[in-house]
Image: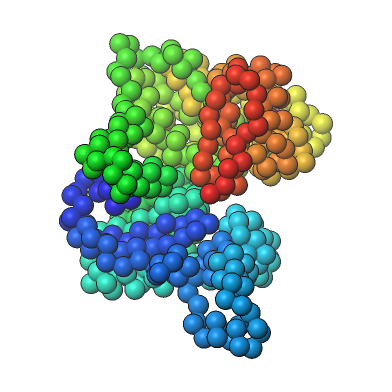
Amino acid sequence: MQKKTAELLGKPEDSLNLVMCHLGNGASMAVSKGGVCIDTTMGLTPLEGLVMGTRSGDVDAGVIHFLSNHLGYSSDKIDKLLNKESGLLGLCGSSDWRNVCEEADKGNESAALARALSIQRIRKYLGAYLVKLDGKCDAVVFTGGIGENDANLRESVCAGLSKFGIDIDSTKNKVGMSEVQSSFASVKTLVVPTNEELSIALQSAQAAGVLPAAKVASAKASVKAATTAAVPAAATSTVAPLGGAIYIETDLRNTELTEAALLATVVKRSSQLGYFRLLTPGVDKDPYLQYMRATAKFGLTDVPVEAMYGMTTEEAAELYAAGKADEVFGTIVDKYKAYAEGRDFVLVTGQNVDARGAREAPGSSFFYAQLIKSLDIPAVIVHDCYIEGVEGAELEAELQGIKVRSRLVGTGRHLHRTRTRSLSTPRRRASTASR
């Protein structure tokens, strides 16, 4: 993580002072000074520190004596309690951060307490680590499934810290940029994807003597090159291999970063770029649309913003409820075709709404699948297997049935691992791997 951060900042590792927040179902923080880790929230085991999915984090040592002497708990029962039955699970009955936040927003007091306690514990260590750095911090780094995907958590953790040079730009944060600090901040706030499996595998191979240090470095370089290779410059300004447009479904959080990265790559090869939202919550409530238009190099201000989306989610829902689904499809398709005319490439996305139990309602994956068929453009569909109460295989069958040109990326409950494959290959259940 420190190496990735140094690369992002364009500075040598040994010159950096960092506070790193690795937040997932398991969570920890670390502080490095001059490139050397000087403290972490973990102790002898990962149990110490932050509130986690099932681990308690910091706990008064007297609790152990109380559980043993007064309640008759054995050492094994205490270990199980603190490691597997505490944390978010013990506080509110769920170890899944997304469920905790959903319930807290609905007014569940236990869930609200769990969320607040988790955030306050992070802030407590952040303050302690700023002291360890003598107030000289280059960046606060968020990573892990929660750290990367929960913009509200990042904003809450950094709230009120402008006097320490930490200040988040709300729009950048919601869109999911890698740097989310405001222009007034002296400390960078970064969102950096992690690859724990690769790091563990390479370090283990080196420790076991299976892979020399030089080859570990070479392996890391190879992975980096494979994942960050630049797209070759095209001979012309068009991007015909992409078919003139591509659709990315935004069921999950933070596909905005993927969208911005794709546009940044294509803009070098396109004389007339486009960005179109099939559904939007409204221009003033759509950070994706606002950010894309505000990025000068994309050149997306050649038309009024109203031309860059098909319909608001409210309008679509009202028409759908009135039995006017054809009008929804017709309006969106007509607006898209008018906007796309004369453009080399258009990135098409949609605003997902809560469509559980409404198979073809506006905002559901099935709604978008039918719409993309009408637009006749290729699609990359990022789909949480359970977000609409359907299995990934069921969605896949639907896509095959209507012959949508697409790739399905199935995700599990914590969004840490995905498997991508062509829909033309034999069908298998979408991945439900959790962290």
288 sits to left or right of 14: right
- The quarter of the picture where residue 223 lies is top left
Residue sitting at 62 percent across and 73 percent down? 77
Q: Residue at x 74, y 32 (%)?
A: 360
User: Is 237 above or below relative to 32?
Assistant: above
Left or right, 113 with respect to 259, comes to right
Depicted 280 relative to depicted 404: above or below: below
Residue visible at 50% across and 82% down in the picture: 60
**Residue 10, percent across and down?**
21, 45
Q: Nearer the viewer, residue 89 or 273?
A: 89
Residue at the extreme bottom: 70
Who's the residue at 40% across and 55% down the image?
142
Q: Provide residue 427's location: percent of width, then percent of height.
A: 65, 24
Residue 1 rendering spot, x and y as whole percentages: 33, 50
The answer, for residue 281, to whether it is visible in the render is: yes
Q: How many badges with numbers are in the image?
A: 0
Instruction: In this rendered view, identify the residue nearer to me: 240 or 137.
Output: 137
Q: Taking 76 as reference, is 142 above or below it?
A: above
Q: Identify which residue, 408 or 323, lies in the foreground.
A: 408
Q: Closest to the observer: 176 or 51?
A: 51
- Asked if residue 280 shows in the view, the reply is no
Looking at the image, what colour scheme do you see?
Answer: rainbow
> Which residue is most to the right?
323
Image quadrant where residue 259 sits: top left
